[in-house]
Amino acid sequence: MSKVPKIAVIGSNMIDLITNIHRMPMQGETVEAPDFDLGFGGKGANQAVAAAKLGAEVVMVTKVGDDMFGRGVKENFASFGIDITYVETAPGVTNGVAPIFVDRDGNNSILIVKGANEHLRPEDVDKARDKVLGSDFILLQLEVPLETVYRAIEFGVENSIPVILNPAPARPLDFEYVKKVSVFVPNEVELQMITDMPTSTMEEVQKAGESLLERGVKTVLVTLGARGALLLQDGHCELFPAVKVSPKDTTGAGDAFIGSFAYYYALTGDIAQAVKIANHYAALSTLNTGTQKAFYSREEFDRARAGLAKE
Ligand code: ADP
């Protein structure tokens, strides 16, 4: 029987409140908007769902709100077979929400209310110990308190569980912790903000990535949208070009990439192979609107990839 990857995600969840608007109301004004949609989101949750849809055994460690959103988020995780033992409710606190306003030209204005995500504490990492032990990877992002992220990195080191850190959204980081992660996966904007170096050209991306290797990070994997992904490690640097598609909605492509990368890296043990497949998985996720609902199951993905290979 083939191996079932086991992934522990310690991170955020949000409810996306997406309103399509003709224009923003002015102060004191009420205007009608044509459409509204509600989606499950948050970087941690999205990455967990991508890995689970592919067939990973996923443990989610997160805090939900003491409200109807919190209950919905729990149910959503459970519907994908994600272990929700440590999806805990923060008493008296609202769920994390992201009110998103999309105008007729597709431009986004986004508010983030972290809510319960701010209540995921370092102690919660240790509390979830029994479920996290034995994971192939711990997957982290930066939408929860930094001290919790740092504790999770330490936990990984203490228990020989490699850590994949997606530094999103970008924040100043303590490299005493960052250098202990196995794979550091920023997009080009995050790379620019964290290194304070330009990342417009491929040469600049490479230089900025190398500066992280010099600071002790073992492996850097930079996602570059339609340009693909750049892998830097052991003095080697390799570009994996993106799969050519005509995207409908690239929201959540980074999360699709990371969730699938973790799954296939655990499955194959081959990082280059995992990057190639993650490029495919993320590209396919841009063909559908929405975030989690745009992610393919393993079966859908295998079928779609076979189709792409024939073209
Ligand atoms: P983020 O969503 O964090 O901004 P990126 O835009 O770098 O992340 O996208 C993540 C990955 O998704 C890319 O490395 C690539 O594999 C895939 N991807 C994103 N946009 C496209 C696109 N327009 N065409 C093909 N693949 C894409």
Image (cartoon, grey):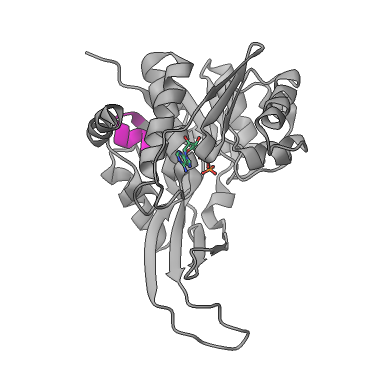
Above or below, comparing residue 201 to residue 40 in the picture? above
Where residue 160 sits in the image (x, y, percent)? 53, 15
The residue located at (34%, 56%) in the rendering is 72
Left or right, 232 with reference to 225: right
Asked if residue 280 shows in the view, the reply is yes
Q: Which residues are magenta?
A: 50-57
Q: In which quadrant will I find the C terminus?
A: top left
Q: In which quadrant will I find the N terminus?
A: top left
Outermost residue, front direction?
311
Where residue 27 sits in the image (x, y, percent)? 63, 85
Outermost residue, top direction?
234
The residue located at (48%, 77%) in the rendering is 22
Q: Nearer the viewer, residue 74 or 295?
A: 295
Q: Nearer the viewer, residue 309 or 192?
A: 309
Above or below, comparing residue 188 to residue 290 in the picture? above
Quarter residue 179 falls in: top right
The number of callouts visible is 0
Asked if residue 131 shows in the view, the reply is no
Membership of 235 in magenta stretch: no
Where residue 238 sits in the image (x, y, percent)? 57, 19
Q: Nearer the viewer, residue 83 or 254?
A: 254
Above or below, comparing residue 213 to residue 311 in the picture? above
Where residue 282 sits in the image (x, y, percent)? 41, 37
